[in-house]
Image (cartoon, rainbow, N blue to C red):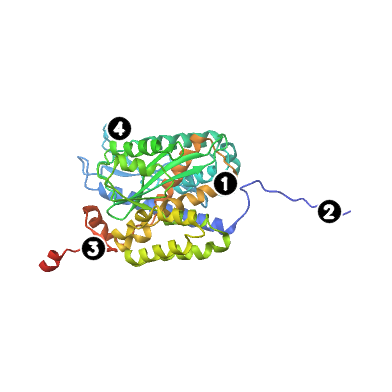
């Protein structure tokens, strides 16, 4: 009689992975070394404090109870050193060690915290986290119940509320990019429209400036956003605003900041034009359009512009009209530094940020309510903001902010200035 074979099926999160185990032990050692170094620095910083009998006031006093911290490579057990204040005064006056690397009550790393919005937006419901996280982070990944995720979501709402009321008195933006982004929420009949404004600081850093849940892309919604920014202290108008042509943003901008120059997005404009032409001709027309915005000077751009109009106006008047009506706004970038042209010809800073968000919500066919979608997208943007590329030609930005004139991407110098030089 054959012996029966018994196969033990491991529970999710209980699989053996020697490489991950090695990494986890190595990470544990590094964390403990870093905490010990931090504690040693703390003790050295208080070494001069002595009691009346000459003994040190602050000394080591064992460790706090061991706790496990959930990281991207699994659970890592850590023991934080504990200090003792021999002074014997009140608790409020005592000196205690508080690790900055591993603050009290922290149970998961920031990378795991940052992953939660992505997983939630991907379609994992709050009730599924208790099953999914042990598979991703190991069997010790506890504390991811539905209530925990809901509390985190409430924390994100408070974060958004606080961010929306922050003061902007000290802010000054050379450029702003504006766009309306549509996402389909599962429990809503209409798509959610999120109005987004990203700004470029004089230091070349891009940051999220405005973000509201608007009614489509109406002038009223954009006006509310711009007026709110102005009321919170953003009194200096940006020098240039970049956006597509199908928004109420431009009408609102004229009312709130009429001094700001307009630049239409060439990517949106190109798509709008070639959609009015037969597919067999779209590649060639796209190349002709590219010759306009890639020209080295406004004069060359005007020549390429006129050539396109002459070439296609007879057979495709709608496409020609689509290009011609925004001629001035499409070529505004020539009045700004050439180093910035690749940044200000399109709304790419917004489009690239939302590409992944749109893809995920499209794949899940709307996994969120309108309110939840708004909060989650805000969290995703703030996480992505840390990796946004700075503008090239940073030395030119203070000139833009101060109002220096540029012609064909070069600083404009008057005849008198040339003579003085």
Pick the residue in front: 320 or 197. 320
- Could you classify mark 1 by the number of other residues whose Cα lies within 10 Å: few (under 14), some (14-19), or many (20 or more)? some
Q: Quadrant of residue 217?
A: top left
Q: Quadrant of residue 420?
A: bottom left
Residue 89, given in percent of the width and then of the height, sits at: 26, 33
In terms of sequence position, does the residue under pointer 4 or pointer 2 come before the other?
2
Kindly identify the residue that appears in the image at 55 percent across and 56 percent down. 20
Disc 3 from disc 4: Cα separation: 63 Å
Disc 1 from disc 2: Cα separation: 52 Å
Q: Secondary structure at mark 1?
A: helix
- Which residue is under mark 3? 411
Q: Is residue 341 left or right of residue 75?
A: left
In terms of sequence position, does the residue under pointer 3 or pointer 4 come before the other?
4
- Report the label total: 4
Disc 1 from disc 4: Cα separation: 55 Å
Disc 4 from disc 2: Cα separation: 67 Å
- Which residue is under mark 1? 362
Kindly identify the residue that appears in the image at 59 percent across and 44 percent down. 364
In terms of sequence position, does the residue under pointer 1 or pointer 4 come before the other?
4
Q: Is residue 99 left or right of residue 25?
A: left
Residue that sits furthest to the front in the current view: 314
- Which residue is under mark 2? 3
Any mark on residue 91, and which?
4
Pick the residue in front: 52 or 211. 211
- Could you classify mark 2 by the number of other residues whose Cα lies within 10 Å: few (under 14), some (14-19), or many (20 or more)? few
Disc 2 from disc 3: Cα separation: 87 Å
Q: Quadrant of residue 228?
A: top left
Residue 16, given in percent of the width and then of the height, sits at: 62, 54
In terms of sequence position, does the residue under pointer 2 or pointer 3 come before the other?
2
């Amino acid at each position: 009689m054959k012996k029966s074979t018994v196969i033990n099926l491991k529970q999710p999160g209980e699989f053996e992975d020697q490489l991950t185990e090695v990494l986890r032990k190595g990470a544990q050692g590094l964390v403990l070394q870093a905490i010990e170094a931090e504690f040693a620095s703390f003790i050295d910083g208080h070494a001069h404090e002595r009691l009346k009998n000459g003994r040190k006031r602050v000394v080591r006093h064992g460790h706090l109870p061991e706790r496990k911290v959930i990281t991207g490579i699994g659970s890592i057990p850590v023991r934080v050193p504990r200090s003792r204040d021999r002074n014997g005064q009140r608790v409020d006056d005592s000196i205690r060690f508080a690790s900055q690397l591993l603050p009290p009550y922290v149970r998961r790393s920031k990378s795991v915290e940052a992953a939660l919005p992505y997983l939630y937006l991907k379609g994992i419901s709050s009730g599924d986290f208790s099953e999914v996280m042990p598979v991703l982070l190991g069997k010790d990944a506890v504390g991811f119940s539905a209530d925990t995720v809901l509390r985190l979501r409430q924390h994100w709402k408070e974060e958004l509320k606080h961010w929306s009321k922050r003061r902007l008195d000290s802010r000054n933006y050379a450029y702003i990019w504006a766009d309306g982004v549509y996402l389909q929420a599962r429990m809503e009949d209409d798509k959610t429209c999120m109005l987004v404004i990203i700004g470029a600081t004089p230091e070349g850093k891009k940051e999220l400036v405005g973000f509201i849940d608007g009614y489509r892309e109406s002038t009223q919604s954009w006006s509310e956003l711009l007026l709110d920014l102005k009321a919170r202290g953003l009194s200096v108008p940006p020098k240039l605003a970049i956006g597509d042509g199908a928004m109420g943003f431009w009408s609102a901008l004229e009312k709130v900041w009429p001094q700001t120059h307009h630049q239409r997005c060439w990517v949106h404009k190109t798509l709008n034009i070639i959609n009015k032409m037969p597919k067999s001709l779209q590649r060639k027309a796209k190349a002709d359009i590219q010759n306009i915005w890639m020209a080295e000077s406004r004069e060359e751009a005007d020549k390429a512009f006129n050539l396109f109009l002459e070439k296609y106006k007879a057979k495709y008047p709608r496409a020609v009209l689509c290009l011609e009506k925004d001629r001035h706004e499409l070529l505004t970038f020539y009045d700004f530094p050439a180093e910035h042209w690749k940044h200000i010809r399109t709304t790419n800073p917004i489009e690239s940020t939302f590409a992944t968000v749109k893809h995920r919500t499209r794949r899940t066919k709307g996994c969120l309510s309108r309110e939840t979608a708004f909060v989650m997208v805000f969290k995703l943007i703030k996480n992505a903001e840390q990796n946004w590329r700075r503008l090239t030609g940073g030395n030119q930005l203070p000139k833009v902010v101060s109002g220096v004139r540029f012609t064909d991407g070069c600083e404009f110098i008057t005849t008198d200035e040339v003579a003085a030089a």
